[in-house]
Amino acid sequence: MSTSEHDPADAAATTETPGSAEPEPGRARVVAGRYRLQSVLGSGSMGTVWSAYDEFLHRPVAVKEVRLPPGVPPSRAAELRERTLREARAIAVLSHPNVIILHDVARENDEPFVVMELLPGPSLAALLRDHGSLSPPQAAAVADAVGSALEAAHTAGITHRDVKPGNVLVARDGRIKLNDFGIARNVSEATMTRTGMMLGSPAYIAPEVASGGAVTPAADLWGLGATLFAAVEGRPPYDADGDPLETVNRVVHGEAPQPGPGPLGPVIRGLMAKEPGSRMPLREVRRRLYPLLAQPRHTLFGPELFAESSANTAPDRGDTTATQVISAPALPEPPKPEAGQAGAGGAPAGGGELAADPGPLPFESPSHPVSQEPVGARPRGPLPGVAVTVVAVLLFLAAAFGGFVLTRVVAAQPLGPPQRTDAGPTAPPLRELAPRRGDATNLRGARGGLFSVQVPEDWTKFVSGETGGGLPPRTLVQFVSSDGTQSFDVERFDSEPLLSPDVYWNALGKLWGGNLRQVEYAPLTDGRRGLLLSYRTVESSPVRPGEQSERPLNRTTFAHVFQAQDSLWVVGLTVPTDQEETARTRLFDRIMPTFQIIE
């Protein structure tokens, strides 16, 4: 999976080592007792990728070993290891001809290794570097394959977040695959990226992601457009002389780059719209690419493209196309005074240590000119001191107000306070309800867990097995909002004896301890035997840089807990507590009556 031998800077593509075969026993490191590492295909800030041999199934594979980026504190080591496992979970749900196949996740000394198919070919980044831009039919074939892979990923609720040439593989037989979902984020998971930090490739990152906004599938549309731009132009859409922070600044504040004339120009411009909601949908992208796909892919990419090249025309500078952790840009330094001029506060130009005594203030009241006598040579009356203090306070207030006005004007924000809205500042827009089905059956082949419900049409379904908390094993079916903040959950418990609503509530109280607060506890009035529960929970969220402790995350749950068909069902809505009032009436009271168990 990760780096081509032609592209070691970016752990993104895999290529088969020429003449690779079963290695000589005892000569290489073996992972998990079966994967014999042969050679390094490439390494980057997020990991090292090996060409390896699976001694159990007798086939070549690619093995990615996690690597901690330079400067990352030890406290984040576990997070980066979890990101590697997240990559495996993300890809495991995808079965698509344009997505790299996941074989296994192995552990060696508690370190995760992701085992994937080894594709015989370089990355698109390597092809562009060694052979220049692609022809329109070649670029269209790449865009169509990547677009098809993204359609499958988005349907599964996965956002890739790092679409770029280094993560597109082109095989000698014409196969084109999207790779390295290493920072993919299932929309039901909370993002691991900290405030003030970004994870991505500066030259290809979407503007809203670079500026700290929400990560949605629209970010992948931008990445596809940026990749297509690089394919037809032979260069990244943004690259400020290898400076990651300046490149990100241009992505956020600069104009979208304009491709040269050609049939793919309208598609690139449609994908690289600065406003996420204005980007061209994948279905429309593929429709426009169709006329350029007449030639078979295996004839589009001739053998000359896969010949090894020792030429490297890349300048000796930083790399803005590699996936990396990017700190928030630092504040610009004040301009240095020219030679001979005084610096701030009257200090001579050229710097130096601060004096032990800063001396008198650089101004005096008009009626009392600055004295030429040494400090402390004669006593001063109270009036000049008062005047100096008043003037200093007035100047400070004027500077503070001026700075506030300037900041608001530059940010194009009104000077007055923000207007409150009744819907709450974090509530996503409500879509029309659409009928959905789910299966909360615990055992494969069992019956009785089928149900139907109507939820907002843009919510994504996820199914997982749940254990622990003093409760029997169960299947959890979730319908999660597009921003990941709201979810409608369905659980079904099969146990002997039959679990009662009161026993469930008591187990919930033990699980949360002092972090659960009951709001409502009443019998159901819809004919079912059970309880209407409403409660608030508090859990910890990740610590932001500069914070000394974890921040509380407040959520509210509305649920019906009832017995039906010899099972206990728990059906409810969970939302941020600041959306509690509107979510009760706009979501829960509308969705819950539509829930039906299918006989």
Image: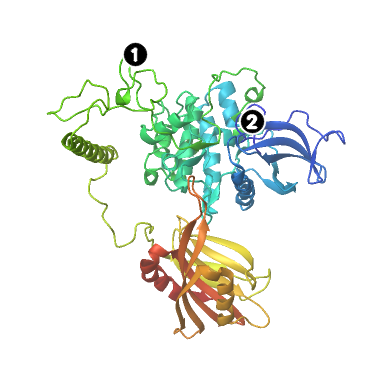
- Residue 443 to residue 523: above or below: above
Amino acid identity at mark 2: Pro
In which quarter of the view is residue 249 placed?
Answer: top left
Q: Is residue 380 above or below residue 486?
A: above
Q: Residue at x 44, y 58 (%)?
A: 458
Residue farthest left in this picture? 367
The quadrant the C terminus occupies is bottom right
In this view, the residue in front, 389 or 238, is 389
- Residue 89, placed above or below residue 449: above
Residue 541 placed where, x, y %?
Answer: 51, 55
**Where 376 falls versus 22 (above or below)?**
above
- Identity of the amino acid at label 1? Ala
Q: Is residue 141 visible to us here? A: yes
- Where is residue 23? Give x, y as percent: 83, 34
Q: Position of residue 501 (x, y in %)?
A: 55, 81
Query: Mark 2 falls on what kind of element?
Result: loop
Of the two numbered discs 1 and 2 on the same chain, state the one appearing first in sequence.
2
Q: Residue furthest right?
A: 25
Q: Circle 2 is placed at which residue position?
A: 122
Q: Position of residue 21 (x, y in %)?
A: 81, 33
Q: Nearer the viewer, residue 217 or 291?
A: 217
Q: Residue at x 70, y 41 (%)?
A: 117
Indicate the quadrant containing the N terminus: top left, top right, bottom left or bottom right.
Answer: top right
Q: Contact (CB < 8 A) between labels 1 and 2?
A: no
